[in-house]
Image: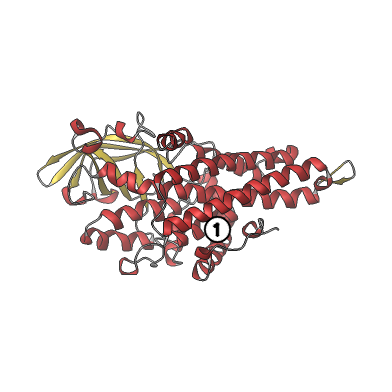
Amino acid sequence: MTNPAEILGLPKPAWAADEVGMLYDMAHRFMSEEIAPRYEEFEKNEMVDRESWLKAGAAGLLCASMPEEYGGSGGTFAHESAIIEAIGHVGVDGFGIGLHNSIVAPYILHYGSEEQKKKWLPKLATGELIGAIAMTEPGAGSDLQGVKTRAEKDGNQYKVNGSKTFITNGQLANFIIIVTKTDPEKGAKGTSLIVIETDEVEGFERGRNLDKIGLKANDTSELFFNDMRVPTSNLLGHEEGQGFVQLMQQLPQERLQIGTGAIAMIERALAQTIDYVKERKAFGKAIIEFQNTQFKLAELKTEATIGRVFYNDCVARHINGGLDPVTASMAKYWLSDLQGKVVDECLQLHGGYGYMNEYPIARMFRDARVQRIYGGTNEIMKLLIGRSL
């Protein structure tokens, strides 16, 4: 099969050389040997099992960008990108490592106390703790200022009430960062982030594992907090009211990570489709020999190349501390839009077989759709970009 990592024929960027490339190879091998053979089972069960998380931790694929002193591998987002790209190229997109590694863990690294970092990061690195972040509510999605979940201080504890929905890793997660209002009167300035270890709190309840169109292997859940008691020491940051600023500071990486998944699937869809049209025949010749097929694939490869060059530039800027929120929003919206277009066109080139679940392009078609919604909808991304004009 054509290698998705080589389909565009581009040289590796500087950030993907040496140990990052070695990590990609290791992650690709792990996903191919440990996850892919069981992926149908995970899709049916609507979650990747806890054993696989522990294996990923033992293989060094969790918290790759966390410092070694806290159990991580001491890498950068380049290393996280290598792991997410391997997941996308193998086609096990429902394994929620990306959120755990480059969204949840960085909140602890950047805003946690030394005690919190030493307590939580090593367990996140082994997979003993599986991370989630609870932002979205039934009445508040992309607009995080609309969060209603309330945390009231009561002595040395917070009493938390509210609910969350669409929470990735929600059934398995035993380590959850909750976006709450500690002072509703202050709006965004009254928002705080509070951590819970679900095995240690009362008043926490998981709802159902939500029935989604795609990404079936990734558990996505409702969460409920009913007078849930949490130690005040679980607040992230030195004081209340820092949550909204913390979220805004971390969202660029979250949005870039969505771009990682997008470009990886784009490359996989192209590689598999090129293989297919070379083998499939119609009217006595291979589909690749028709001018329409060549023109379509020429367009897609060109756009994918533009997308990959843009993505590589964003990663380089991010590693050097220069990825601004506007550019991250551009990467999230444009790459996920392109992902939808490429996968749709590739499915069309498969003909009727593209609509059959036994063909990987059908799963890609379903899995790609949510990329334009989570992490802030693409419409919100355009709004943010528009404000910079």
Residue 221 spot, x, y in % from top left:
40, 39
**Residue marked by disc 1:** 86
For image coordinates 25% across by 36% down, the residue present is 188
Label 1 Cα crowd, 10 Å radius (few <14 / some 14-19 / many 20+): many
Q: Is residue 249 above or below residue 163?
A: below
Q: Is residue 43 above or below residue 161?
A: below
Q: Is residue 230 above or below residue 377?
A: below
**Of the residues shown, which amino acid type is indicated by label 1?**
Ala
For image coordinates 52% across by 49% down, the residue present is 261
For the C terminus, give its image quadrant.
top left
For the N terminus, give its image quadrant.
bottom right
Residue 267 spot, x, y in % from top left:
62, 52
Residue reaching furthest top?
A: 139
Left or right of 266 in this view: 23:
left
Q: Quadrant of residue 222?
A: top left
Residue 264 in view in this figure: no
Left or right of 210 in this view: 228:
left
Left or right of 9 in this view: 204:
left
Front position in the image: 191 or 98: 191
Colour scheme of this structure image? secondary structure
Left or right of 316 in this view: 292:
right
Residue 365 spot, x, y in % from top left:
61, 40
